[in-house]
Amino acid sequence: MNFTLHFLADIGRDLIEILILTVGIYWLWKLFRGTRGARVLAGFGFLLAVLSLVSYALNLTVIAKLLSFSPLFLLAFLVIIFQPEIRRIFAEVGSRPLFSPHRHQAEVIEAVINGLEQLQLAGHGALIAFEREITYDPARETGTMLDAQVSDDLLATIFFPKTPLHDGGVIIVQDRIALAAGIFPLTQSEGLQRTLGLRHRAALGLSEETDAAIVVLSEETGIISLAYNGELRRPLTTDELRTQLIGILLNRNTDEKSFAEQLAG
């Protein structure tokens, strides 16, 4: 009887381990599927598998010994190849639980950042507003309504200089691009730097009238700025922008004064 119970307990533990490994591998596959390093990782895994089979078949002890260290190399390889994805994962986990309903918003933030990186490389500008509770109806009267899924390629296309929609701003509502080519109100604040163009003044103006978070990419300098609550922070790296947007858009109970405090620091 005791032997049977121990046997069933061992089987149960093995099944649980197999289930955990299966879920973990499937989750990782979904997470990294379609990324730039996915094909490289697949090729690296295939090479390891072939070398393992050849060394076992031909009894190549030196190669087999080297392959015994492959998990360490694979771990370092993963960190190097998937550095942007790993950084994104930690950003999401640090802001909210992984399966939170706000996960879509984190994906939108990442799509916007990827789009900004494309536009930076191309030397183009951008004006993107994340709408929250307060809407700005005049922009809907002047802009072009879209209702499209947010993607980096779509944003890069919208702000391409030769497209009809590149002038004005984009408004994102939840995970959708609500409109493009919207006209935002210009700030009336005095004492602004002369180097700030219309995009920056429009971003500040919208942040003064609504609770939106507005991202500006300068066409002339490639500098990223963020306007929120009547304040403008610049220059920002993409990592700094990600942190700011996560704090504003995901942590809704965060004291809005913290943004101004960070500006002062």
Image (cartoon, helix red, strand yellow):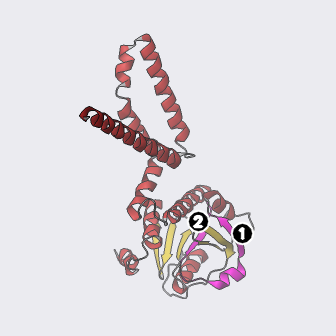
Per the model, the C-alpha gap separating discs 2 and 1 is 19 Å
Q: On residue 220, which mark appears?
A: 2
* Residue 140 covered by magenta stretch: yes
Q: Does residue 79 appear in this view? A: no
Instruction: Identify which residue is drawn at 47% across, 50% down.
Output: 85
Q: Residue at x 31, y 39 (%)?
A: 9
> Which quadrant holds the C terminus?
bottom left
Quadrant location, the N terminus: top left
- Residue at horizontal 67%, vertical 66%? 148
Tell me how many marks there are: 2
Give the numbered dot on residue 165: 1
Give percent across and percent down for residue 52. Answer: 44, 21
Q: Which mark is residue 264?
A: none
Residue bounds of the magenta highlight: 123-150
Q: Is residue 145 left or right of residue 29?
A: right
The answer to which of 21 and 245 lies nearer the viewer is: 21
